[in-house]
Each structure stands twice: as C-alpha cells, then as structure tokens.
Amino acid sequence: MIIKNKGACAAAFAIVVGFGAETFAAIANWEARVDQILVDGEFFGGCMAAVTPPPSEQVSANCNTPWVTFSCDGTFNPKPIANVKLSAAQLAYVTDTPVQLTVTDSKKHNGHCFVTRIQNK
C-alpha cells in the first residue's frame, strides 16, 4: 500500500511508533537488602519482598513501591522457581546480607514489579 497523503503517512508512523514504544520494558539489576517478606494467598502473586534501595530508584516510575514480587502463584514462572527465589530472599533477610536483583516492569502483580533473578551475595 502506498500512502500519498503526508498527513496519513505521519499518522500511520505515529501509531506504529506509539505501539512499539509500549513493548519495551525497563529491566534493572542492582544490589539490595531485603527489609520485609510477605506471603499472601490471594494477592501480589503470592509472595513479595520489600527491598532497599527500591526498584523505583533503579528501573523507572513504573515500579513505584519498594516491594517486588516472585510470582509464587506460578503466573510468571513455575511455582518451584518462585519458591526458590522466595527462599533466597528469606536467607538474605535472616542473615542481613545483600542480594543481586534483576527486575522487570513488564510483568507485575497488583502494580509490583517481577523479580526475574535473585542472587545471594
């Protein structure tokens, strides 16, 4: 299809660029401390941790709270993997040692960004 009207061409370009921009996710990797652990049977993907510094200082305004989810309900990763992530966070919490986190804002539970990777230090 050839678009002869410059206005229509500009509008088509804006639509394509607009939709494309939404597909890019912010991913952050940083060292953090685990301040709190939450396990819930109904919300937040089942389990979360509050970390310092928060993801909002690392990723973007799209991760607005210090809480990150491991998706223990199996939505974003298999439940056994989520439980190992939760265990790593619990270990860091009880030993007061840092973790290396990788978080994406493309997957969220109740507005909280998803941890794709956690590594004990």
Image (cartoon, helix red, strand yellow):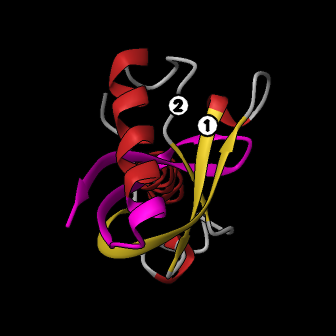
Whichever of labels 2 and 1 marks the residue nearer the N terminus, that label is: 1
- 90 relative to 69 in the view: left or right: left
Q: How many labels sit on residues?
A: 2
Label 1 packing within 10 angstroms: few (<14), some (14-19), many (20+): many
User: Which residue does the numbered mark 2 point to in the structure image?
Assistant: 71
Q: Where is residue 52 shown, x and y percent of the image?
A: 52, 79
Judge whether 98 appears above or below 108 on screen.
below
Q: Where is residue 28, by image quadrant?
A: bottom left
Badge 2 amino acid:
Ser
Q: Where is residue 53 shown, x and y percent of the image?
A: 50, 82
Q: Where is residue 76, by image quadrant?
A: top left
Badge 1 amino acid:
Cys
Give the residues drawn in magenta, as a range.
92-121
Q: Residue at x 43, y 56 (%)?
A: 21
User: Which residue does the numbered mark 1 point to in the structure image?
Assistant: 47
Q: Where is residue 48 shown, x and y percent of the image?
A: 60, 46
> Camera-side residue: 58 or 73?
73
Q: Secondary structure at mark 2?
A: loop
- 66 relative to 16 in the view: left or right: right
Closer to viewer: mark 2 or mark 1: 1
Q: Residue at x 58, y 19 (%)?
A: 73
Residue 80 in view (yes/no): yes
> Camera-side residue: 116 or 4?
116
Q: Where is residue 96 shown, x and y percent of the image?
A: 42, 72
Q: CA distance from mark 2 to mark 1?
A: 6 Å
Q: Are marks 2 and 1 in contact (CB under 8 Å)?
A: yes
